[in-house]
Image: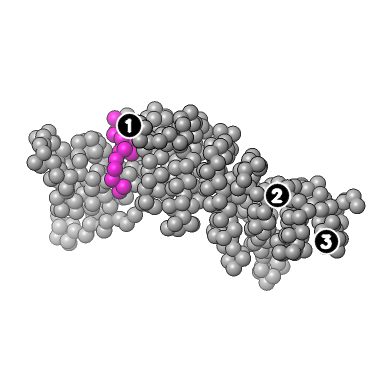
């Protein structure tokens, strides 16, 4: 989100006068006196005499005076400076902002106040102070029920900042757990918003929550699980029951439509869900949702990420999202193989994608022949464990998934793969290099089937991999 421009520096005469009077905030050139004036103006906005309203001035309360907006936006920008943030804390500015959030109906003013608190929370001492204030915590969580996207965005940014501070993360997890309506609000945002910036930030909050607390993740997965899945909404005036996985899917589709590279966070949420049995069941239990997720991820790996016309180095940019996508596909494949959408004919495109990623990984590991390292006697391939932990994780996921697909291959599918090129000698060699020796039985069974389809190809592969002991 674009920031408002920084306030112009004071003129020379003004600066000298303020320095002489000790008016500067810390080591900055920002004026204490000016800031006091702005904060006093905020206090006036939410003072009791100004909050007494009737229907005639209700509309006016939702608008912010242009001069006040400009000044408070300058404070927003200034609050990224630690000296200013500490001064605001000392002046009890968070209490002023809490009063604004509790009383003001002006969306722009509420957005700015949460934004300033979000900037202040970037500094640990202030984050701890903000987090320890129960009343402020309640008010901030209530902002998640707001209908204004910019306010929701800033609230999500503030929550993510606090959840990323180990000292206070558990405080916010417990508060969120106690407010069951937050689940509905977040699901509503994910399922209905078209604001991709907001969807990504809300996704980051959910991802962080699930990463911090598996119990909360299970509670959210189970929410709505006992309700009728297809209950007509017109039959009841009650609020609709949100189920987590369909909402995540809708958000992912919306994010993909604008920029697939931003999908990382939602793919990781799905990956976290697959680490628990209830999460897997939530994905595959509803046929339509399971099918839609499978088709989305299938399309991403077969037509979007790490394609044949991409340079191998693209893998470095896409390794984390690919790890999540293939992990979820693998979990669905292993847990629900009887589903119609997991028909065997989809195995060959997946094999092609899996092997392509493995081949790109091999290229990424190679060192330039003329590099200094080549003169030291080191191998051309880096040690994955030391060089790139994420590539190691991706490789493990790819190999496990590939081995599961290989075990499901029939003679007819292998024949089709050989004919169409997905199971050429080069691609099979790449697969074997990565599957051996850990998946030797799988490779040996595959060779047996391959020999019935193309004996010459099977013999060539056996010669290239003498460790294979295939009974003929």
Q: Position of residue 283 (x, y in %)?
A: 54, 40
Of residues 69 and 277, which is closer to you in this image? 277
Task: Give the answer, above or below, for where 371 lies relative to 253.
Answer: below
User: Residue under circle 3?
Assistant: 454
**Regarding mark 1 in the picture, which secondary structure is present there?**
loop
Query: In this picture, which residue range is highlighted in magenta?
Result: 135-150
- Residue 310 visible? The answer is yes
Of residues 9 and 57, which is closer to you in this image? 57
- The N terminus, quarter of image: bottom left
User: Residue under circle 1?
Assistant: 237
Q: Position of residue 333 (x, y in %)?
A: 64, 45
Q: What residue appears at the point 86 percent right and 60 percent down from the top-left corner? A: 455
Q: Are marks 2 and 3 in contact (CB under 8 Å)?
A: no
Q: What residue appears at the point 26 percent right and 58 percent down from the top-left corner? A: 5
Specify the principal SS of the magenta part.
Answer: helix
Q: Position of residue 369 (x, y in %)?
A: 69, 70
CA separation in Å, label 2 and label 3: 19 Å
432 left or right of 96?
Answer: right
Tally of numbered tags = 3
Examine the structure image and report whether residue 379 is included in the region drawn in magenta.
no
Nearer-N-terminus badge (2/1): 1
Nearer-N-terminus badge (3/1): 1
Q: Are marks 3 and 1 in contact (CB under 8 Å)?
A: no
**Regarding mark 3 in the picture, which secondary structure is present there?**
loop
């Amino acid at each position: 989100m674009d920031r408002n421009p920084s306030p112009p520096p004071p003129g020379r005469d003004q600066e000298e006068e303020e320095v002489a009077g000790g008016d500067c905030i810390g080591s900055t050139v920002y004026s204490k006196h000016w800031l006091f004036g702005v904060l006093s103006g905020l206090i006036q906005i939410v003072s009791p005499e100004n909050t007494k309203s009737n229907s005639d001035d209700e509309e006016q309360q939702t608008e912010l005076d242009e001069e006040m907006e400009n000044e408070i936006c300058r404070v927003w920008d200034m609050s990224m400076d630690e000296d200013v943030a500490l001064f605001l804390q000392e002046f009890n500015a968070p209490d002023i902002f809490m009063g604004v959030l509790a009383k003001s109906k002006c969306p722009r003013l509420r957005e700015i106040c949460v934004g300033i608190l979000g900037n202040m929370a970037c500094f640990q001492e202030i984050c701890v102070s903000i987090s320890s204030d129960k009343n402020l915590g309640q008010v901030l969580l209530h902002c998640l029920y707001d209908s204004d996207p910019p306010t929701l965005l800033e609230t999500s940014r503030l929550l993510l900042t606090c959840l990323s501070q180990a000292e206070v993360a558990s405080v916010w997890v417990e508060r969120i757990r106690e407010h069951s309506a937050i689940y509905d609000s977040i699901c509503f945002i994910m399922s209905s918003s078209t604001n991709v910036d907001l969807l990504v930030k809300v996704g980051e909050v959910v991802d962080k929550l699930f990463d911090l607390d598996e119990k909360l993740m299970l509670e959210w997965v189970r929410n709505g699980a006992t309700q009728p899945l297809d209950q007509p909404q017109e039959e009841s005036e009650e609020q609709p029951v949100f189920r987590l996985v369909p909402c995540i899917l809708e958000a992912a589709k919306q994010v993909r439509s604008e920029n697939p590279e931003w999908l990382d966070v939602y793919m990781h949420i799905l990956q976290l869900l697959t680490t628990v049995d209830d999460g897997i069941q939530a994905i595959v239990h509803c046929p339509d949702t399971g099918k839609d997720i499978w088709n989305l991820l299938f399309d991403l790996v077969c037509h979007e990420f790490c394609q044949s016309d991409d340079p191998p180095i693209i893998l470095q940019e896409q390794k984390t999202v690919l790890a999540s996508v293939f992990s979820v596909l693998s979990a669905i494949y292993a847990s629900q193989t009887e589903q119609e959408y997991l028909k065997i004919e989809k195995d060959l495109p997946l094999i092609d994608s899996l092997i392509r990623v493995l081949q790109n990984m091999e290229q990424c590991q190679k060192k330039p022949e003329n590099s200094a390292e080549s003169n030291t006697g080191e191998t051309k391939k880096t040690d994955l464990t030391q060089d790139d932990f994420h590539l190691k994780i991706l490789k493990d996921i790819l190999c496990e998934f590939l081995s599961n697909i290989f075990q499901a291959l029939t003679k007819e599918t292998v024949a089709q793969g050989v004919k169409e090129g997905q199971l050429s000698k080069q691609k099979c060699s790449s697969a074997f290099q990565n599957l051996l020796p850990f998946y030797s039985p799988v490779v040996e069974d595959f060779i047996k089937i391959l020999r019935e389809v193309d004996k010459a190809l099977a013999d060539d592969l056996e010669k290239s991999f003498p460790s294979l002991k295939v009974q003929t």
